[in-house]
Image (cartoon, helix red, strand yellow):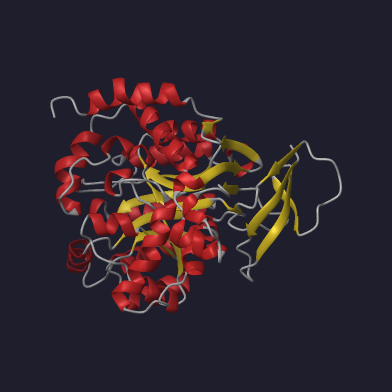
Amino acid sequence: MSILFQNVTAVLMDGASTVLSNAFVAVEGGKIASVGAKKPEGVFERVIDGKGGILMPGLVNAHTHVPMTAMRGYGDGHDLHDWLNNFIFPVEAKWDDRAIRACADLGLMEMIASGTTCLCDMYMNTLTIGQAVADAGLSANLGLGAVFFGETFSPEACGDCAKSQELYDAWHGFDNGRILVDGSIHAEYTSKPGVYEWVADFAKSHGLGINVHISETQTEHEECKARHGGLTPIQVMEKYGVLDVRCTAAHCVWTQPEDWAVMAARGVTAVHNPASNLKLGSGVAPIVELMKAGVNVALGTDGVSSNNTTDMFEDMKLAAILQNGVRRDPLALTAQDALRFATVNGAKALGRDTGSIEVGKQADLILLDADALNLIPCHDAANNIAYAAHGCDVKLNMCRGKVIYENGAFLTIDREKTLREVREYAVPMLFKGK
């Protein structure tokens, strides 16, 4: 379908950080066909008047656990390891596919309504999540976070190996690459070297990336060093070949200078999850230092269970002002830095041709409400996005040229059915006896 956006303030996120007032952006065949200050020639099947509102690239949520909407606000007030072992893992043991689907749909609706067009999800029951993403119309990199607590590893003893292959066979490349599968390791502390090597070999042989939790807490970081002769989680992953492919490392709160050098040399992306890290008391990631070392930094919300939303605008603002406050430097991170985390840097992390409004790129676009009170006036569009916008300001969400949300209406997910399934089936089943 050919669509023309007109009368928009287009924040392109190109190399020059261009902002075009009164811009025209044309979409054809799922891609951006033209961008400029002059109306393109030709007839369009639909013309969308932005009324002066901001048109920007769709947001890339580079680290999520989308079905965990079920645990929103559950187990608050505990550090990561207490929270996982005593609250989250016992509930997750009760999952079935019906509950996963309901809670995944709820999470995807929340993302769509707040401007996400692409996500990187690590979880279980991934075949069901794949179907939910496919139906929702979003783009996603999906990974099954491999876990193994046994003494002796073998692919047969670790069920996540077979499940990873099954996920790849079912969903990798779906809809011309709208869904991609990545190798995935939950973390150093929830698996063993045999798992690291198997996932690394799996990713290499299939041309995939890998996503993994890295140095989220000080305890995790220091206990890893004790287990592996002084090696940090990043260094362990390098030792076993995990960094030989495109890799997204979530959190990186307790990474060290020697880790940053490895990450920069190997092209590893650090995915910053500021709200989650603060809520769980894990710490503040050294984002400025990572950037100075040459590491690509992207942005994620983590699971709703530890955030408690998927509003990327909230994490964008927090990412910027947190670093400025900690360093007592208002320029430690800029609005443009935060925007890049959530768009072009996230796209790079996931191997996606999106994240900016440029001819030939995927038409992943969101339109912000021109009449949103918190966006008036607009002296600087980037500043308004990073510091003033909220997810609720998103008026339209387009993924690969298809409008999937507009004026509060979900065009790909049945809102009422989803809410009914979450309230009447998933929550009672997961929390029975609580």
| Residue drawn 51% across the image and 55% down it | 375
Q: Nearer the viewer, residue 109 or 83?
A: 109
In this rendering, the count of numbered labels is 0
Quarter of the rendering containing residue 216: bottom left
Residue 312 percent location from the top left of the image: 43, 52
Q: Is residue 24 above or below residue 417?
A: below
Q: Is residue 245 left or right of residue 175?
A: left
Q: Is residue 397 left or right of residue 161?
A: right
Q: Is residue 67 above or below residue 85?
A: above
| Residue drawn 28% across the image and 30% down it | 95
Q: Is residue 181 visible?
A: no
Residue 293 percent location from the top left of the image: 43, 78
Q: Nearer the viewer, residue 396 or 136?
A: 396
Q: Nearer the viewer, residue 61 or 6?
A: 6
| Residue drawn 28% across the image and 63% down it | 215
Q: Quadrant of the C terminus?
A: top left
Q: Nearer the viewer, residue 83 or 142?
A: 83
Residue 360 percent location from the top left of the image: 72, 54
Quarter of the rendering containing residue 322: bottom left
| Residue drawn 16% across the image and 45% down it | 85
Q: Is residue 312 visible?
A: yes
Quarter of the rendering containing residue 327: bottom left
Q: Is residue 172 above or below residue 329?
A: above
